[in-house]
Image (cartoon, grey):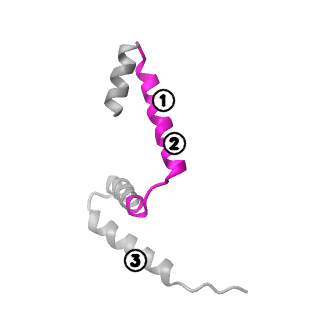
Amino acid sequence: MLNIYIRNEEKKGGRMSDHLDYLLDMARKYRQEKGFPDEERARQVRSFAYGNTHLENSRITKSDIDQTVDSLRFERDHSTTICS
């Protein structure tokens, strides 16, 4: 569907920035209307964490990230908050 849109716009003489603006608008609307599924969001968080930490320390593995995220989630889900 997107390829058809781009080809049609190119035939009309549309610029690439117009295509990019259209795609960005579609992404914004999708995010506002539907959001991202929890599984997709979790996958993106892990990927982001791995990419950033691996740049700083090449010994970091995806397994390290998985273990850390899982332990943080466990702590969050099992912590007790004391209100005064």
In terms of sequence position, does the residue under pointer 1 or pointer 2 come before the other?
Answer: 1
| Spatial CA span between label 1 and label 3 | 40 Å
> Residue 29: image x %, image y %?
52, 43
* Dot 1 crowding, Cα within 10 Å, few <14, some 14–19, many 20+: few
> Residue 54: image x %, image y %?
32, 56
User: Circle 3 is placed at which residue position?
Assistant: 71
Question: What residue type is disc 3 on?
Answer: Ser
Q: Decide whether residue 23 is among the magenta residues.
A: yes
User: Circle 1 is placed at which residue position?
Assistant: 21
Seen at 46% across and 41% down, the residue is 27
Q: SS for tag 2?
A: helix
Question: What residue type is disc 2 on?
Answer: Arg
Q: Decide whether residue 18 is among the magenta residues.
A: yes
Seen at 49% across and 84% down, the residue is 78
25 vs 74, nearest the viewer: 25
Q: How many marks?
A: 3
Question: What residue type is disc 1 on?
Answer: Asp
Q: Quadrant of residue 61?
A: bottom left
Q: Quadrant of residue 5?
A: top left
Asked if residue 67 is positioned above or below residue 27 in the image, the reply reads below
44 vs 57, nearest the viewer: 44
In terms of sequence position, does the residue under pointer 2 or pointer 3 come before the other?
Answer: 2
Seen at 48% across and 29% down, the residue is 21
Q: Which residues are magenta?
A: 13-42
User: Circle 2 is placed at which residue position?
Assistant: 28
Q: In the displayed image of the protein, which residue is found farthest to the right?
A: 84
